[in-house]
Image (tube, grey):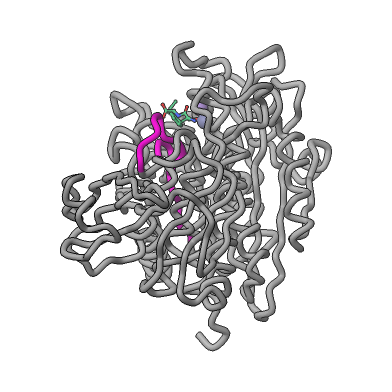
Amino acid sequence: MKLRFVRRSTAGVRAVPLAVGAVPPKPELAVVAGFTGRRGQVSEVVTRKRRLLLLGMGEAPHGNADWEAAGAVAVARLQTLEHIAIDARERTVDAAVALAAGACLRGWRFDRLRTRPDPDRARLAAIDVLTDDPVAATAAWAAVHAAVRGALFARDLVAEPGNILTPQGFAARLARLETAGVSVEILDAAQLQREGLRALLAVGGASVNPPCLAVLRWRGTIDAPPVAFVGKGITFDTGGVSIKPAAGMWQMHGDMAGAAACAGAMLALALRRSPAPAVAVLALAENMLGASSYRPGDVLRTYEGTTVEITDTDAEGRLALADALAWTAANLRPQAMVDLATLTGAVIVALGGVMAGLFAKDAALDGVLAAHVAAAGAAVGEPVWRLPIGDSMPDALLSDIADVRQCSLAPQVPDAMHAAAFLRRFVGDTPWVHLDIAGAEIREEATDRHALGPTGFGVRLLDRLMAQRFEDPHR
Ligand code: BES
Ligand code: MN
Ligand code: ZN
């Protein structure tokens, strides 16, 4: 999709955001259409020269979220056209840019695997954002566009099916990051063996597509330890020997959304030349079942050294992450770690898929990091909600024959907190936040506001976190 900031446009259709009481372009037509400017209202009027889509903005004033929403609605309603304009004249540069971001995010679609046009006939190819100051808007757009492109990159990865986006397929896609200036290193299964990431190897052990660890580095210009993003990258989760029910299993090709978000965030940082050093470590594996599967009752020795008694091979994410987190802490010595993972169905039950669950240690620095992560998420429309890990958790994970048990046997249904408690054992003293993004990574239906399918959740949050917390060299 091509998007430009311009003073004039030849597009025959124009979306015009209007607050209550504002005078629309053709007042008499707006009255006939019943348009009042009520928040979320959409009315169409046709003049002799063009078609106008009037977007109700409510009482004003508006934050970026409202402008993004308006941009999204414009695209949702007009996506069967090739060329549209969105009117941001007499608006601030920030508002124009937010309209553009909302439009681009809502306009995303994944058509690469179609051989004929999609049934919605979506063909929007060019958007003109009308503004009084195209130069300033274009300049301000650069940084926001970087984050948007990162999010769309992540969505593309999550959309790709498991037979195409294998661990190796995922690694191949990371070439896009190298073009942008991110260094990409892939530790293959033989290297994982040598390094001792046996938990990750066990999770991926039953697949013909072997697991690997992708290490992405953005150097930045500030001389400080990097911030690390650690992602769960299960490119397909059958559950393994503890196999999942057939219904809905197909969706588990998206079980690499955490890793995709980390990769997308790295792309965003590189595209806007962030001064802050960052690394991303992606644990890529297929959780399959076969003759070489790991099994319930097995005991694995993790990279960090702790032995784990397996109780459910479908709790594979915490194993892959345990090795990735411990490896990252030991080898990259980051000043902070944030992991993103579609870790538990329970967090969907708790937060309804509209927020991610945030978990952190009780230490002071971890609390500060948690607050910054939550603030960043709120600012970009990727909300998170802090959940407790709890003190009873270490005991619940004691095993009769190994150092720890993979899952607690105590709760009736699997929960998100024991998963977080398990991860906590592997991060040492490094300040750490865990985001359980299950449910937030995908939308089951399209709305005016949101596109159907992968959301790219976490990309803009991480990008904002870096901007507000780690880019001031004097902090
Ligand atoms: N990838 C799933 C969690 C998930 C479920 C993500 C639905 C997105 C949508 C994870 O690997 C899993 O299977 N979790 C189990 C853990 C249980 C076996 C302890 C769960 O949450 O049921
Ligand atoms: Mn699973
Ligand atoms: Zn999983």
Position of 321 compared to 45: left or right? right
Provide the residue span drawn in magenta. 432-448
- Which residue is pictured at 48% across the width and 16% down the height? 244
Q: Is residue 359 above or below residue 373?
A: above
Q: Which residue sits at x=66%, y=71%?
A: 273
Residue 196 in the image, given as x and y percentages of width and height: 73, 42
Side of 99 where 411 appears, left or right: left
Nearest to the observer: residue 109 or residue 418: 109
For residue 455, say whether it is visible: yes
In the depicted structure, whether residue 83 falls above or below residue 61: above
The percent position of residue 169, horizontal first and vertical second, equals 74, 34
Q: Image quarter for residue 241?
A: top right
| Residue 378, image x, y percentages | 35, 60
Of residues 93 and 473, the one nearer the viewer is 93
| Residue found at the far front of this picture | 48
Q: Please check the rendered image and state whether residue 445 is part of the magenta-colored stretch, yes or no.
A: yes
Left or right, 467 with respect to 88, comes to right
Q: Place residue 202 in its image quadrant.
A: top right
Q: Position of residue 130 (x, y in %)?
A: 47, 65
Q: How many numbered markers are drawn?
A: 0
Tell which of 34 and 260 is nearer to you.
Answer: 34
**In this view of the protein, which residue sits in the foreground, 24 or 141?**
24
Mark yes or no: residue 430 visible. Answer: no
Measured along the vertical axis of the image, is residue 311 above or below residue 14?
above
Quarter where residue 313 is shown: top right
Q: Is residue 329 magenta?
A: no
Q: Which residue sits at x=46%, y=75%?
A: 132
Which residue is located at x 44 percent, y 49 percent?
A: 13
